[in-house]
Image (cartoon, rainbow, N blue to C red):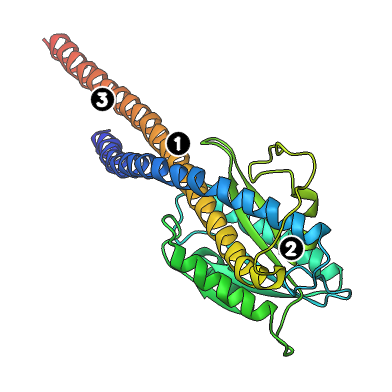
Amino acid sequence: MGAQIRVYRQRIRSVSSIKKITRAMELMAASRVVKARQRVDDTTPYSAALTRALSAVASYGEMDHPLITANENPTRAAVVIMTSNRGLAGAYASSVLKESERVVERLRSEGKEVVPFLVGRKAMRYYSFRNRDFAESWEESTDAPTFETAKAISDAVLATYLGEDEGSVDEVHVVYTRFRSMVTQEPRTLRLLPLAVVDADEANTDDYGHGGTDSMHPLYEFEPNAEELLDTVLPQYVTHRIYNCLLQAAASELAARQRAMKSATDNADELIKTYTRLANEARQAEITQEISEIVGGANALADSK
């Protein structure tokens, strides 16, 4: 009985130590997600406005630009998969990977060869474990992405998209987690390029899914000319759109980690209560047994006299 009590007390100490860790991680995620949400709120309006403007130009203009002209017979598609470097965030990484698998399967069913670009060690390990090839990967901090990382990704994607060799692609898709609120984050697939096909139907919808204020596309005048302007703006559009996706994925990761660590802390509290009750019951049974043995011995002595 005493050994059982020691086991319960050891488990209480172990769970208490784990609870301190999960509680600390919960507080860290809670403090960092505030800044991450602010970065999303700061960048999303610009990204959405730039998307609507370029979508209007791409959809209703009469310009022939490689970034807004769809290939009539696309054969290869790049897929940028944004996951996390660390775990302990619930089903965050697995949800993105499941969404990416659906996208890859759909593209292959359309007869397209898929070229993966991976962001985060979770995606890299997922592909490495299954002996799958990928074009390029990045494992910089996924919960605090920088604009330099977004620029590196966009440069690699644009180089593949604009290439003239056999390794070039005809489409670019991004799989990431869109941050809607602290309790709602959803995996989403964004078809980034070519722009005319990507966002024509979303030109009046911002990145949170709300309708735009304009029901008609505005008309634009270009200085010095449309070609030079698009050569400058479209690469910036790709970079900013990828950066916004990285920021939303980071906020989603931190929110998911906060929820997961809070759930782990609550579960630790329940385990501590359960083990404390079991230890008290075992101690009470041990005391009851000792009293019974004392009473039984006293009765035996009395009977012998």
- When the figure is inspected, residue 60 is found, relative to residue 267, above or below; the finding is below
Query: What is the distance, in whole Å, between disc 1 and disc 3 at their CAs?
Result: 30 Å
Residue 216 at what x, y percent from top left?
A: 80, 43
278 or 249: nearer the viewer:
249
Q: How many numbered badges does the structure rendering display? A: 3
Return the disc, 1 or 3, that comes first in the chain's sequence: 1
Q: Amino acid at mark 3?
A: Arg
42 or 49: nearer the viewer:
49
Return the disc, 2 or 3, that comes first in the chain's sequence: 2
On residue 263, which mark appears? 1
Is residue 131 visible to the viewer in this orientation of the structure?
A: no
Query: What is the distance, in whole Å, between disc 2 and disc 1 at their CAs?
Result: 41 Å
Q: Amino acid at mark 1?
A: Ser
- When the figure is inspected, residue 112 is found, relative to residue 176, above or below; the finding is below
- When the figure is inspected, residue 81 is found, relative to residue 7, above or below; the finding is below
152 lies left or right of 62 = left
Q: Secondary structure at mark 1?
A: helix
Q: Amino acid at mark 2?
A: Leu
Q: Crowding near pointer 3: few (<14 within 10 Å), some, many (20+)?
A: some
Residue of label 2: 195
The residue lying at 64 percent from left, 66 percent from top is 234
Residue 193 at what x, y percent from top left?
A: 72, 66
Q: Crowding near pointer 2: few (<14 within 10 Å), some, many (20+)?
A: many
Is residue 216 visible to the viewer in this orientation of the structure?
A: yes
Q: Crowding near pointer 1: few (<14 within 10 Å), some, many (20+)?
A: some
Residue 180's quadrant in the figure? top right
The quadrant of the picture occupied by the N terminus is top left
Residue 64 at what x, y percent from top left?
A: 80, 73
Q: Secondary structure at mark 2?
A: helix
In front: label 2 or label 3: 2
Residue of label 3: 283
